[in-house]
């Protein structure tokens, strides 16, 4: 695991965008695994600028998003579909047919999970998976649990995740309590992983994920078993890790 310290959020975003660009420049038909949340927004903004300058070309790139709420339509402003299009996809030269996001409105959610997983395999797997980390250590919506779930699956969100994401919704009743997420196997099969982390409120969980036992109660800890993970985190997020790794 490579730990790369960034000065602050902007610096983290620039380094993260450099890693994503390098991937796409080296392999123009890369399969990218993408994340939602506040953390990767700066990376997407930087990539949009470089795409406008023609420094990075997304015309042959395929993307798979980590997760989606169950019960929110694509048009719903809180769906991850809406988030990804408004924050990133509509500003770059990606082909609509090359974008994959789980369908939270699918009639049969189990079938949707199976078909999502098989589409990832069909394209040869993910070349670079971008991840954030939740305050409870989740990656995607793989919540703390007694086991690591392997493939794309439906999951009930934990109270801490509901609390963390509630501010995006008008009220608690409007926030879905379940989601589809890529599984730990889906993530761990990615050839490379980029974990982004910013802010002191993540310092404790990031430290546990990097230095603690591999424990499904801290889902991100499984990343220690992957052979090509780069963590790009700002100084605030690395505070506790730095104290413990001396
Ligand atoms: P955040 O979410 O980037 O909004 O902090 C991260 C996550 O929950 O994975």
Image (cartoon, rainbow, N blue to C red):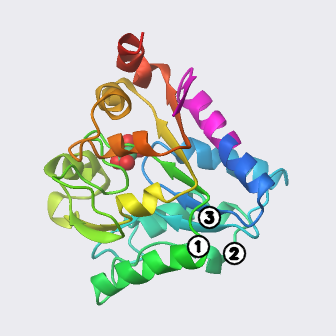
Give the x, y percent position of residue 65. Answer: 48, 64
Residue for badge 3? 89
User: Residue 3: within the magenta?
Assistant: yes
- Label 3 to label 1: alpha-carbon separation: 9 Å
Is 208 situated left or right of 54 in this image?
left
Give the x, y percent position of residue 46. Answer: 67, 44
In the picture, which quadrant includes the C terminus? top left
Sequence-first disc among 3 and 1: 3
Residue 95's mark?
A: 2
Residue 32: quarter of image? bottom right
Residue 99's mark?
A: 1
- Label 3 to label 2: alpha-carbon separation: 9 Å
Residue 122: quarter of image? bottom right
Tell me, yes or no, whether the two marked residues, 1 and 2, touch with CB atoms within 8 Å.
Answer: yes
| Relative to 122, residue 233 above or below | above
Q: Residues within 10 Å of mark 2 (few under 14, many from 20)?
A: some
Is ligand 1 closer than 8 angstroms to the Cβ of mark 2? Answer: no
Bounds of the magenta segment:
1-18
Of residues 139 and 49, the one drawn nearer to the viewer in this rendering: 139
Regarding mark 3 in the picture, which secondary structure is present there? helix
- Seen at 47% across and 80% down, the residue is 118
- Seen at 34% across and 76% down, the residue is 104
């Amino acid at each position: 695991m490579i730990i790369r310290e960034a000065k602050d959020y902007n610096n983290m975003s620039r380094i993260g965008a450099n890693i994503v660009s390098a991937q796409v420049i080296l392999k123009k038909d890369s399969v990218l695994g993408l994340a939602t949340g506040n953390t990767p927004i700066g990376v997407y903004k930087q990539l949009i600028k470089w795409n406008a300058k023609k420094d990075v070309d997304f015309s042959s790139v395929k993307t798979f998003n980590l997760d989606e709420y169950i019960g929110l339509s694509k048009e719903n402003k809180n769906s991850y579909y809406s988030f990804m299009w408004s924050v990133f996809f509509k500003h770059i030269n990606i082909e609509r047919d090359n974008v994959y996001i789980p369908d939270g409105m699918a009639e049969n959610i189990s079938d949707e999970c199976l078909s999502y997983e098989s589409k990832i395999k069909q394209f040869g797997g993910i070349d670079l998976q971008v991840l954030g980390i939740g305050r409870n250590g989740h990656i995607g919506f793989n919540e703390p649990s007694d086991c690591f779930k392997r493939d794309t699956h439906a999951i009930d969100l934990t109270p801490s995740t509901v609390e963390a994401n509630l501010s995006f919704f008008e009220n608690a009743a409007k926030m879905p309590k379940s989601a589809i997420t890529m599984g730990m196997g889906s993530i761990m099969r990615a050839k490379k992983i980029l974990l982004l982390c910013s802010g002191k409120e993540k310092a404790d969980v990031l430290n546990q994920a990097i230095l603690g036992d591999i424990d499904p109660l801290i889902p991100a800890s499984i990343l220690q078993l992957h052979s090509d993970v780069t963590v790009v985190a700002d100084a605030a997020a690395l505070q506790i890790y730095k104290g413990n790794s001396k």
